[in-house]
Amino acid sequence: MIFIEQTKQALSQQLESLCRHEEATRPPAQVKAIRRVETAVDIDDPLDWLSHQAHATRTYWANREGSLEMAGVGRADSLSGQNKLDYEAIFAGMHQTLQASYPNVRYYGGFRFNPLVTADKYWAAIPGYSFIVPRFEVIRSGSATLLAYNFIVPQEGSIEGVLRQFQEEFDALRLEPRHRARFSIELGGRWDLPSQKEWEKIVRTALRMIERDELQKIVLARKSIFELRKPLNPFRLLKRLTKFKSNVYYFCFQPVKSVAFIGATPERLYYREHQELISEAIAGTRARGKDAADDQALELQLLKSSKEIQEHRWVSKVVQEALDPICLELHTPVRENILKLPNVQHLFTNFRGKLKPGITDGKILSRLHPTPAVGGYPRIESLIRITELEPFDRGWYAGPVGWVSRDGAEFAVAIRSALVSSSSISLFAGGGIVLGSVPEEEWEEIENKILKFTSIFKSDGYF
């Protein structure tokens, strides 16, 4: 309790000082701007801490390198909407409230894969796009862990009112250590959309389109629905996923208490710091081997597969064509590399560039999303065919998810993901269909991709 009171007092003193400064110096017509106070905190595991919070709105993000982890509760500000996305306007709305003097303030969120598709009942509670600045954040960066409080200074109202609101919200947090509890998932039935028989029929239909030169590549996805016999804490499920310690982004967006979108994706869409840009292409898959020799054999098989190389180079080609016009310089490796994950390995190409002046995040995102790794080629034709062929709504699956700050942004592609409700878990994964694809093999490839989740369903334990 001493630690909790010290934390509360440290934030409260900073908050009062900042509010009094704002009151004395701000102009009368000041636009809305987010402010932040923070203090060091002794929380070993931000995700575990977040899993015990009672707030309806919770947000989690951890980057692929393990250098940034954020667990957020509530919302200090948010932007959301439904279809017909205007990327430029959405990013402009965020940048209007982000201030240079608070570089660590970030909006976290994402977009639907295809904003022109109407949400089905599973996705009804999650907007077409949503970005949140959490009210409270536990941030771990390097060796430091901080508790931050984000707020908007009111145009009218007393400082005492701001402090009173902080006190009430802080007291609602659960900062004390919690006892570990057994984690288990009680599942009912499973059904797949499409079924394996229907999947093979759909893939053969796509292959005929490719043979007629209507498409060069299309990415078709599956949805596997697992019935829950009792509600599941999505953050505890995500915590189990992090035990794999693989080279992926971990995320969870819970805008309301009844539903959450979680994932462990290997794929970066882009990372920007000022004018420096990093992007990549990931496509082409093999399972991991049973031992080192088997794994090496599968890697060589992947590197020599004309089908997998073709699939990867479609993605790489389109990413390069998207970035060339907006970059002063762009560097790409001569040949593909291998990205190894616990259950699968992928062909991988990295791009590094310097942006031209005036290029916004809205422009970058609109040029990159969706890449042929999750859509296909040509882009528009593949999106039309995906809508026709897939018997479910992708929602945020394969859409861009990430964060935006004053001077940077990072977005991942939300593959290897799941939608968790009070009654079911829906797993999403897809595979690239090109000339030479075999429907039965594509089914098995997707089974390997969701293995990270399904293996957790069969295990339990304490954490």
Image (cartoon, grey):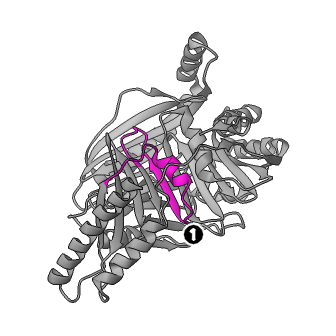
* Quadrant location, the N terminus: bottom left
Q: Position of residue 426 (x, y in %)?
A: 70, 52
Q: Is residue 373 visible?
A: no
Is residue 385 toward the left or the right of residue 337 in the image?
right
Residue shown at 58% from the left, 61% from the top: 114
Residue shown at 30% from the left, 59% from the top: 38
Q: Position of residue 369 (x, y in %)?
A: 48, 54
Residue shown at 53% from the left, 72% from the top: 84
Work out which residue is located at the far top of the displayed protein and give it: 293
Q: Position of residue 284 (x, y in %)?
A: 56, 32
Q: Badge 1 is on which residue?
A: 127
Amino acid type of disc 1? Pro
Work out which residue is located at the far left of the displayed protein and give it: 25
Q: Is residue 30 above or below residue 166?
A: below
Callout count: 1
Q: Is residue 247 visible?
A: yes
Is residue 339 toward the left or the right of residue 31 in the image?
right
Q: Is residue 151 above or below residue 362?
A: below
Looking at the image, which is closer to me, 213 or 176?
176
Residue 366: quarter of image:
bottom left
* Quadrant location, the C terminus: top right
Check disc 1: other Cα within 10 Å, few if <14, some if 14-19, many if 20+. Answer: many
Looking at the image, which is closer to me, 10 or 291?
10
Looking at the image, which is closer to me, 45 or 58?
45
Instruction: State which region is magenta.
Output: 40-69
Q: Could you say whether the residue bearing mark 1 is in a helix, strand or loop? A: loop
Is residue 21 toward the left or the right of residue 376 in the image?
left
Q: Position of residue 226 (x, y in %)?
A: 77, 49
Q: Is residue 306 magenta?
A: no
